[in-house]
Image (cartoon, grey):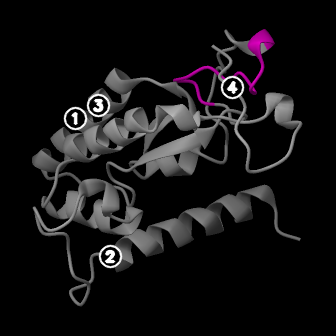
Amino acid sequence: MNSRREFLSTTSTLIGAAAVSAMLPERQLYATGQRALTDLSAVDAVAAMRNGDINAEDYAKALLDRADALHSLNAFLTLDREMVLDAARAADNRRSTGIRLGALHGLPIPEKDSVNTKALPRTNGTPALRNYRPKDDAAAIKPLFAQGAILMGKTNMHELSHGLPATTSPSVR
């Protein structure tokens, strides 16, 4: 049985390998105007951001706009647009300085509301925890942030994880 540390290390390595594979010469890179930004896979988006074909702020805006357009699905409990765009701008600034970029550079990732993130509250889908703010990020997502991923928001879930999968409960707001 693998330890938690081995699991996190292996997972981080696999994610990094997927992002690096997108940068290989034989892979067709995103060309501005050919596809909508929201049609890009995560691997293609990271490759395009690392290469400067698109910037992280535009990609984040496209994803946030798409989430807003589909608000009726109740997919997100928490979206902090300015937080995401500030983080994307910071990613673009890092790229412009020429410093080494992480394997997930600029990639906005959603997190389930049951996962601790210090940047956003964790309600576990219940109004009783509406104001709970974790002091630290969960160990499972720290490696993602260390590789340049951006927290996009917290996704909906059944209250305290009780309920059937594939249905969305109303917002806890």
Q: Which mark is residue 170?
A: 4
Q: Amino acid at mark 2?
A: Ala
Residue furthest bottom in the image? 26
Q: Magenta region: which residues? A: 117-128
Q: Which mark is residue 137?
A: none
Q: Is the magenta region chiefly helix, strand or loop?
A: loop
Q: Which residue is mark 3?
A: 85
Q: Amino acid at mark 3?
A: Leu
Q: Earlier in the sequence, mark 2 or mark 3?
A: 2
C-alpha gap between disc 4 and disc 3: 26 Å
- Which label sits in the foreground, 1 or 3? 3
Quadrant that contains the C terminus: top right
- Which label sits in the foreground, 2 or 4? 4
Tell me if residue 14 is in the magenta stretch: no
105 or 53: nearer the viewer: 53
Where on the picture, by quarter, is residue 42?
Answer: bottom left
Query: At numbered mark 2, what does the secondary structure look like: helix, strand or loop?
Result: loop
Tell me if residue 127 is in the magenta stretch: yes
* Residue 20: image location, x then y, percent: 36, 73
Q: Earlier in the sequence, mark 4 or mark 1?
A: 1
Query: At numbered mark 4, what does the secondary structure look like: helix, strand or loop?
Result: loop
* Residue 78: image location, x then y, percent: 54, 25
C-alpha gap between disc 2 and disc 4: 37 Å
* Residue 86: image location, x then y, percent: 28, 27
Name the residue rendered at 37%, 50% in the picture: 107
Q: Amino acid at mark 4?
A: Pro
Query: At numbered mark 1, what does the secondary structure look like: helix, strand or loop?
Result: helix
Circles 1 and 3: CB distance less than 8 Å? yes
Q: Which mark is residue 22?
A: 2
Q: Which mark is residue 89?
A: 1
Name the residue rendered at 24%, 90% in the picture: 26
Q: Is residue 97 above or below residue 162?
A: below
